Amino acid sequence: MRHEKRGDARKKEILDTAEQLFAANGFDNTSTNDIINAIGIARGTLYHHFTSKEDILDSVIDRINNTMMSDAKKITEDRQIPLLDRLTGSICALNVDSGIGEEVMIQVHKPQNALLHQKMQEKLISGIVPIIADLIEEGNREGIFHSPYPKEAAEMVMIYSNIAFDDLAVMSPEEKTQKIQAFICHAERIMGTAEGTLQEPIMRIFSK
Amino acid sequence: MRHEKRGDARKKEILDTAEQLFAANGFDNTSTNDIINAIGIARGTLYHHFTSKEDILDSVIDRINNTMMSDAKKITEDRQIPLLDRLTGSICALNVDSGIGEEVMIQVHKPQNALLHQKMQEKLISGIVPIIADLIEEGNREGIFHSPYPKEAAEMVMIYSNIAFDDLAVMSPEEKTQKIQAFICHAERIMGTAEGTLQEPIMRIFSK
DNA sequence: CAATAAAACCGACAACCTGTCGGTTTCTCT
DNA sequence: AGAGAAACCGACAGGTTGTCGGTTTTATTG
């Protein structure tokens, strides 16, 4: 463990470049040559830091995932914020105003990035579902929610929002409104809360 | 249009072989060489019938998709069957007792088949959602459902069930029961029907 | 201030992959 | 029988990933 500073800097450089290229052109359409040429290093150097191209992808995903998860945790663990806002905030943290660039998110949803998308989704969902489930249980105790299956409720809301809002950018304003209103209605029903409870906190997030 | 019989037979042979290999080893891990060697044809023959490897994948998916969709339609259009059974039957047609082999379905959900999975899911969802939405509207008129957003309700139920029941095979019986019960509860809430309405028709499908 | 060992780096290379293309065989219709 | 179209062949170009022996840089140590 001698000069690890230099090594980690190079590793970060590779990840930065790969993330940008994957986002711009897709995982399959980005060759390892593209990466090393963009940086100006040799093949051997790349494979000194990573064992395979897929290893690079996994590392890129891990980085993004950690950023998003810590963003979501910051919200959910802040007892200052009202429960409803913590819930809606963490649900939307992974979809709308995600910590990483929007540009990346748009590209992630292209068909050519199916693997990237699926891997990210799997990790995010499995990470965020227990957190959301805790919030729902807290709501149950407070009497504002009535959910007999908090974990599955969280899963359903997260999976749906993550997929359905993929193409929010390419929709007309009316369609968008319709879809968001429907989501609010269904989320309320799933969690067993009074109609309109989630209206205000969710809209606040979407409007910004 | 001379000897199209021969041509279509070869095409079917390629699709059959490709489907099997994709399912067994994944799309990325199956080379066009694997396909032509398994059949015993030359490279040129393969590319005479298909324009690219992805073209083969799309054709394989189309075939599976058509089978499943026609199965689902058979159920939904049969006015003899009660509405509730048509609804649950078509929801589950794409997940549980799908027309194609279960073996294929298991493989489809492996990470190495992300592209295949995503493409299939997209087509199936967009095909089945309007059908389910119609059934929900019919239920609204009959007074057993109360859904202000039939299309989005259908979307939510289909997307969730398609993803969440991916790994039903690798779960303990208790987990499985819990997950199915939760799904029934949430589907009832989303569609706005009395508790227990979907219990019997859904369980009937899962138990077989 | 060498000496040295580890980490970082290099680039040629093997093995593979996809898609192309000119030429050959086989079929079908006249 | 002959002619045209479809089916088929296999060598080939151009690109890809991952390996490996050898070189340079860096940090530590006697």
Image: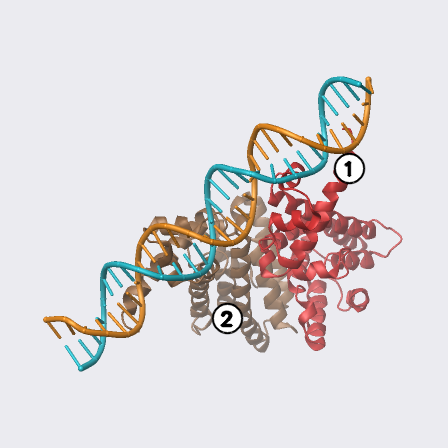
Chain colours: A brown, B red, C orange, D cyan
Report the chain holding disc 2.
Answer: A
Front label number (2 vs 1): 1
Q: Which corner quadrant holds the C terminus of chain B?
A: bottom right
Residue A193 visible, this angle? no
Q: Is residue A114 left or right of residue A64?
A: right
Please tell me which residue lies in front, A119 or B156. Answer: A119
Q: Is residue A64 left or right of residue B48?
A: left
Q: Is residue B192 left or right of residue C20?
A: right
Mark 1 = which residue?
A: B6
Number of numbered markers: 2
The numbered dot on residue A83 is 2
Residue B64 is situated, as x and y percent measured from the top left of the image, at: 72, 50
The numbered dot on residue B75 is none
Instruction: Name the outermost residue toward the right.
Output: B80
Give the amino acid type for the residue marked by disc 2 in the picture: Leu
The Cα–Cα distance between marks 2 and 1, rounded to whole angstroms, is 66 Å
Give the answer, above or below, for where A111 lies relative to A52. above
Residue B76 is situated, as x and y percent measured from the top left of the image, at: 81, 51
Name which residue lies at 73% across and 49% down: B16
Name which residue lies at 54% across and 70% down: A132
Answer whether labels 2 and 1 touch (C-beta < 8 Å).
no
Q: Quadrant of residue B110?
A: bottom right
Q: Secondary structure at mark 2?
A: helix
Badge 1: residue crowd in 10 Å (few <14, some 14–19, many ≥20) = few
Residue D8 is situated, as x and y percent measured from the top left of the image, at: 69, 38
Badge 2: residue crowd in 10 Å (few <14, some 14–19, many ≥20) = some
Name which residue lies at 61% across and 45% down: B53
Give the amino acid type for the residue marked by disc 1 in the picture: Arg
Report the chain holding disc 1.
Answer: B
Q: Is residue A208 left or right of residue B100?
A: left
Q: Which corner quadrant holds the N terminus of chain B?
A: top right
